[in-house]
Image: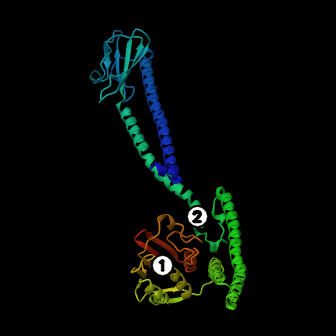
Amino acid sequence: MIRLLGRSLQVRLALGFAVTLTVLVGASGLFLYTSIKSIVYGQIDKEFTRAARLMVHKLDEDHLPLDKEILDVGDHFLVRVSDLSLRPLVETSGMDKKFPTWSSSPTQGSWVWSDGPNTPERSPRTVLVRFEGGWIQLSRDLKPEENLLKRFFHSLLLLLGVSPVLGGALGHVLVKLGLRPLKYLETEARNLRPENLKLRIDTSRLPSELAPLSMALNDSIARLESAFRRLGELNSDLAHELRTPVHSLRLETEGFLANGGMPEETEEQMIGMMDTLDHMGAIIEQMLFLARSEDPATQVEMSPLGVIGLLRAVREPFEPLAEESQITVNIEADPTLELLGNDTLLRRALHNLLANAIRHSPPGGVVTLRATRGAEGLTLAVQDRGEGIPPQFLAILGQRFVRTDLSRSRKAGGAGLGLAIVQGIAKLHGAFLQLQSEEGVGTVAQITFPAS
């Protein structure tokens, strides 16, 4: 979780939104609670003051008689009128059970406020007011107001407890909506391939804050397109320029050998030169093929192919080599399987894979050509039970001129372009190459054609 928090912008923003909302709800709720509490108790004090002044006016100015009617100052108040020694003269019915008389007369002030004692059932507030003939005691139970404020406070606590969850969920949704433009950028970046570098990011679909980034990315893609085009042209031009002199050298060497008359040692050197020139010619042809396969303008003619027939055609030219190496080449495929592809190119790709498999299989080994159809699509696989490939080389195999101690050596005629060619052919078919290998167990090379 900590790692996710450190790396995920969406999680961090959602948590930040949750914390902000919680703090905002808590601060707002506390301010609202204290404000309402102040207003409620302020209003109660005003009602106490009004009722006390009304009683003083009745007794000191109106000189009304001390009877039950004089005690009517509101539904919430209980009133007691006492003499100077606090002996009750008249009081609201039942007040003696709820609010007892004061034990002694106040020594200072004509207005004396008192709260309590509080109990679970009652929360009394009392004011003792001096008039000409004694004291007026007004009392009121504040428990209903306290219960109301307590329920309000509990509701605020509940809201404060829920706000992180609501804030996180709402923040997650808002951040997800806000990050949609970045998802669009991610999708466009994933769609970039050597064959579609002409594509550009549509800045009109992005907010103004991301416009500079999209423009910078478009500029980078344009530079990449230009560099890739120049690199492809260089590869093709270089191969073309090398093919002619290598071919001329081979013809001249062949002529020298045909004329004869050379010392035996020199003749052997010339034969070695012929092999080297043949090797260079093969490399040049492979480089030209790779240049053509990576050209976006390259069009491949596709036709329906029977998979079992394709695999048999691939195996046929290798049967003498396999027999000489005491290796069995099996075919496992459903006779009804078909795929849409170019027969010549697919044969070349499978030839490269099968040649590798036979070369690295021990005498008496088995190589399997397999075709299966699954959820991902149709897969052509070449499996051997040879020495396998070290794990550190699996990620880089398929790059040009990459060879390992267990892969083809120059002595065996390889230049590290075989798997690159297979990848190029797979791309031309919309497929992809995947290698699985374990040292001492064997290797499986798979070309998977996505389901249409």
Q: Is residue 11 visible?
A: yes
> Tag 2: Cα neighbours inside 10 Å, few (<14), some, or many (≥20)?
some
- Disc 1 or 2, which lies upstream in sequence? 2
Tags 1 and 2 touching, CB below 8 Å: no
- Where is residue 233 shown, x and y percent of the image? 71, 75
Q: Is residue 452 visible?
A: no
> Tag 1: Cα neighbours inside 10 Å, few (<14), some, or many (≥20)?
some
Q: Nearer the viewer, residue 113 or 290?
A: 290
Q: Is residue 37 left or right of residue 103?
A: right
| Mark 1 secondary-structure assignment | helix
Visual colour scheme:
rainbow
Which residue appears at 63% of the width and 64% of the height?
Answer: 205
Q: Is residue 301 above or below residue 296?
A: below
Per the model, the C-alpha gap separating discs 1 and 2 is: 46 Å
- Where is residue 132 shown, x and y percent of the image? 42, 11
Residue type at mark 2 is Tyr
Q: Is residue 117 above or below residue 399?
A: above
Q: Is residue 20 above or below residue 209?
A: above
How many numbered dots are placed on residues in this image?
2
Quarter of the view holding residue 364? bottom left
Residue type at mark 1 is Arg
- Where is residue 93 shown, x and y percent of the image? 29, 24
Q: Is residue 19 left or right of residue 119?
A: right
Residue under circle 1?
A: 359
Q: Is residue 215 left or right of residue 161?
A: right
Which residue appears at 31% of the width and 21% of the height?
Answer: 99
Q: Is residue 345 above or below residue 120?
A: below
Q: Nearer the viewer, residue 61 or 244?
A: 244
- Which one is closest to the eye, mark 1 or mark 2? 1
Residue under circle 2?
A: 184
| Mark 2 secondary-structure assignment | helix
- Where is residue 20 shown, x and y percent of the image? 51, 44
